[in-house]
Amino acid sequence: MIMASLFAVLTAVGAQVRIPLPLVPITLQVLFVFLSGVLLPPRAALLSMVLYLAMGLLGLPVFAGESGPSIVLHPTFGFLVGFILSAWTISMIVSAKGQSFPVCFAACLAGMGVIYGIGVAGLYLNVNFVLGKTMTWAQAVKVGLLPFVAGDILKGLAAALIASRVGPRLARPGANIED
């Protein structure tokens, strides 16, 4: 629980480091989503991002923009939901295959796919059905994916490097991060 809570807080801190863009800002949240996935077991990784989303839905200022229940109507909400499944997916891969650098990086790439899949779909649906504007799928990809790919690949490389060096030390006897 402590490690899950720590990664929820780190993700909140990462949200405060942001470069504003139209609709979806660049932040460090994804780095901490990746790190939770590569360093925590699946249940704890999932719980860390559920806790992060719950804190924001309750109104704590943990997101890159506004917080509170109204965030579900915001174009970035799909990305926030994607964090939960991304952390879990990454952790499932790493738990099954080990914490080597190539495995952790491949897992982060899979996690990116999860975030983008859910996030871009949420962006498209929100803009078209909540904001009442017209956005094609291609425009949603252009706004919600393309500006972030290179940076997220670098975040995945950083998370994989950290996990391959720090992860084995965390897994030593006496360093239980299961709960």
Image (cartoon, rainbow, N blue to C red):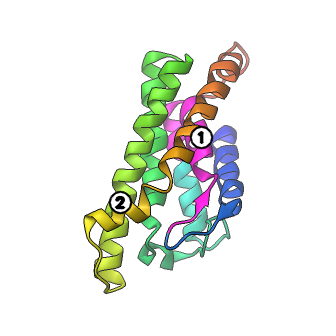
Q: Three-letter amino acid code at disc 1? A: Lys
Q: Name the residue under label 1.
A: 155
Predominant SS of the magenta segment: helix
Quadrant containing the C terminus in the rendered view: top right
The answer to whether 179 is drawn above or below residue 175 in the figure is below
Q: Does the magenta stretch include residue 36?
A: yes
Q: Does the magenta stretch include residue 110?
A: no
Q: Position of residue 26 (x, y in %)?
A: 59, 59
Question: Residue lying farthest top?
Answer: 173
Residue under the image location 63 percent in, 33 percent down: 158
Residue 109's quadrant in the figure?
top left
Quadrant containing the N terminus in the rendered view: top right
Q: Give the range drawn in magenta.
A: 24-48
Residue under the image location 57 percent in, 46 percent down: 151
The residue lying toward the viewer, choosing from 124 and 1, is 124
Q: Position of residue 34 (x, y in %)?
A: 56, 39
Q: What element carries label 1?
A: helix
Q: Three-letter amino acid code at disc 2? A: Val
Q: Can residue 13 be seen in this view?
A: yes
Mark 2, residues whose alpha carbon is within 10 Å: few (<14), some, or many (≥20)? some
First in residue order: circle 2 vs circle 1: 2
Q: Mark 2 points at which residue?
A: 141
Residue under the image location 67 percent in, 62 percent down: 18
Q: Where is residue 167 in the image (x, y as percent from the top left)?
A: 65, 22
Residue 65's quadrant in the figure?
bottom right
Q: Can residue 179 be seen in this view?
A: no
Q: Where is residue 82 in the image (x, y as percent from the top left)?
A: 43, 53
- Left-right relation of 140 to 39: left
Q: What element carries label 2?
A: helix
The residue lying toward the viewer, choosing from 94 and 31, is 31
Residue under the image location 56 percent in, 69 percent down: 21
